Image (cartoon, rainbow, N blue to C red):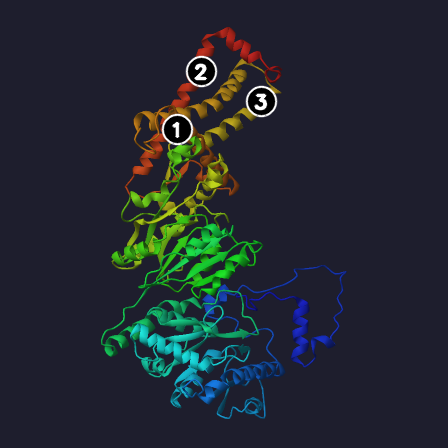
Amino acid sequence: PLNIGSDDAISIKELAYIAFETIGIAKEQVRLITDENKPVSVQNRNSDNKLISQVLGWSPKTSLRKERPDDCLYHLRNFVQSVYETTQIDIAGMNGIKFSVKFFIGIDKDNHPIENNVVEQILKEYKFINVETCEFDLPPGSICKIWNDLAIKAYNQMCDYIVLFNNDIIIESTNWMSKIHEEFVKISNEKKVPFGFGMVTFTPGLPIFPVISRLHIDIFNGIPFPQVFTNQDAISSFLFQLYRRFGCSIISKRIKLMKIIESSKKPQYENDWSFSILDNAVLSVEKWIQNTIENPIPKLLTLDIVVPTFRVDLQYLEPIIRLKRSKTVSTLIIMVVDNPSSPYIRDLKKHEHDEFVRIIVHEKNLGVSEARNRGLKESCADYVFFLDDDIIVEPDMLIEAERIIRKFPKACGFVGCTKFPDPSKTIFTSAVKMAGLVSCFDVAERIEEDIPWGVSANLIVRRYKDNIEFNAMFPKTGGGEDVDFCLQKRHFFKRNIQGSEGFRGAPLVRAVHPWWNNGKRSYIRFARWGYADGLLLKLHPEYTFKDGYLDSSELLIMLLSLLTIFLFTKFFISNLILNELIFIMIISIPLLVVANILATVTRLVILEPESHLPELKGYRRVIAASESAIILIAANLGKLYGKLSRKDWGYIGWRFDYLASRFGYYFVRFTKQRSRTTFNLWVLLVLLTFSYIRFNTHKLERLLEYGLWFKK
């Protein structure tokens, strides 16, 4: 069975009003009576149309509230009046060039049954006599087909420029026709392209209501745009993205309009066109340029920046907006605010005066994965550059990103280098560094090619129609989702695209990540990371392995469980063996922590003194190494808690290979050796401690008799 319906939430009350309106009864004339004594269901309902869209290619085409003819004519009259008021100087030729206006009106017969050609009557009231009205008998949602046919009519009647309008706008800028002409002249002069090449659109906001010249239709052999579109915003976006590749998309601040009816806040793109359809169109333009222009202009690299932000901290976000831009790269900055209640959104939106800065605000907190996915859907670039909202970017990041992309065009992405401030200033930050939990941030300095994954704080990925997104199963605050995303990308490119390779290191694409909470001691973050990383065992079983020994968290839970059982049994049974077992459990718990500390200190201070912060020496290195063991225990506790809370009992004792077999079984061997060493050391400590006290019988008896819980 397939669910079908409106993808906009609607209440039963709203649906009732719409029903009355369809038979000509206005909302104001209706009084609804509700029976509140009956059970109350959900306030609003809508339909998730993903499945039916995939199976049948169906999606809602028409708003639940179709405009009534009177509303349509009211908006049309306002629109025509604004055209009249803003074109008189251009029509009179007072700026040196005389313009004329011809209206091509497309009317959907089913949606707007307007008779007696009242549309032309309105235009004639404002002295627009050059009008051609076309009635279309098309399925609902065919506005793009209407636009396409009208554009062809305008082309055939020798119009120089064609602008696609709806009737729900008001043009605010006077002399907009001459200003558009000047923009095309500017494009031609600056880019050294034939006059008319490119597109110009109005402000504010997204590229809407594009202006194209006859030349565009010439390039595409009489077809203004592909026939696949059903969304009017998609045509504008398509044209913008097409000419953006050549630096000839202009969102002019000199020509402004006001949209009366706001469009949906949902992602504007029908994303399928942004791959093969857009690529084919770009290829057609490239071929035309090669055959027409003596010194062909190069196609620009498109690299969009996506920043999910909950904090909306401008001290980090504004430097991203101010990054140095290359003349050979086109960059759109997309910031997705995942906290609609942030008081700083208004300040951030001030940057939207830059037509290449887009601020999107989620209606509710969806989490970092969904925020990145939204940015990914909004982008139509060749590459997407993910940055976090709490890093300090280097001003030349984009310059270095372009350099590495052009050098290795076959890579599926690039892992930037994110450094932390000097960790040796405090014991805690030194311990974090020595624990190895932040080594993934600057992995680009150690691995040059085929990096399994990189943190999304500084990550470049190649856009491709692979349907790979950040998995919303991971916690909203992040952790593990970048590992999963990168591994999927790496697998897809290496297996499906001939000649492609995995992620490459980009050590010169640099940023600095401040220490969380200014370096204050806290273990909860690493426990959360562990909780999230536990999902990787299920998602990527090819990189899991069975450890021969329980880790510290698993042993700790086991010991606490046994201790609880023995203490409970003590209420019913009392003997020396049980007392000794309880005593062994009690000493085993702190000795487990001691064993982890001793094993870590031995490795980092004695066996590997030059690894992980080699500049840290002496007693400070010993203390930091000791605390790093505590941090690793916290991370392991998070992993175990995740397995237990998700009821993944079968994954207890299993580990994840974070190097994804990049260096063979190195990580597997290292993990197993560390587990074995720690376990054996712990067993040895327990045996020595118990034996020492056992041989001092009187001391053991005193200990076993101490405390009420040992007495029957």
Q: How far apart are the alpha carbons under marks 2 and 1?
A: 24 Å
Residue displayed at 66% across by 75% down:
19
Compare marks 2 and 3 and give the one earlier in the sequence.
3
Q: Amino acid at mark 1?
A: Ala
Q: Which mark is residue 504?
A: none
- How many C-alpha atoms fall within 10 Å of the one at disc 1: few (<14), some, or many (≥20)? many
Element on which disc 2 rests = helix
Residue nearest the observer in this picture, 298 or 493: 298
Residue 454 % position (x, y): 36, 48
Residue 120 % position (x, y): 54, 91
Residue 16 % position (x, y): 68, 72
Q: Amino acid at mark 3?
A: Leu
Q: Which residue is mark 2?
A: 689
Is any part of residue 101 visible from this angle? no
Question: Is 29 located above or below residue 704 in the figure?
Answer: below
Question: Is 294 located above or below residue 621 in the figure?
Answer: below
- How many C-alpha atoms fall within 10 Å of the one at disc 2: few (<14), some, or many (≥20)? some
Residue 514 % position (x, y): 43, 43
Q: Which residue is mark 3?
A: 567
Q: Which residue is mark 1?
A: 625
> Left or right of 666: which side holds 518?
right
Q: How far apart are the alpha carbons under marks 3 and 1?
A: 35 Å
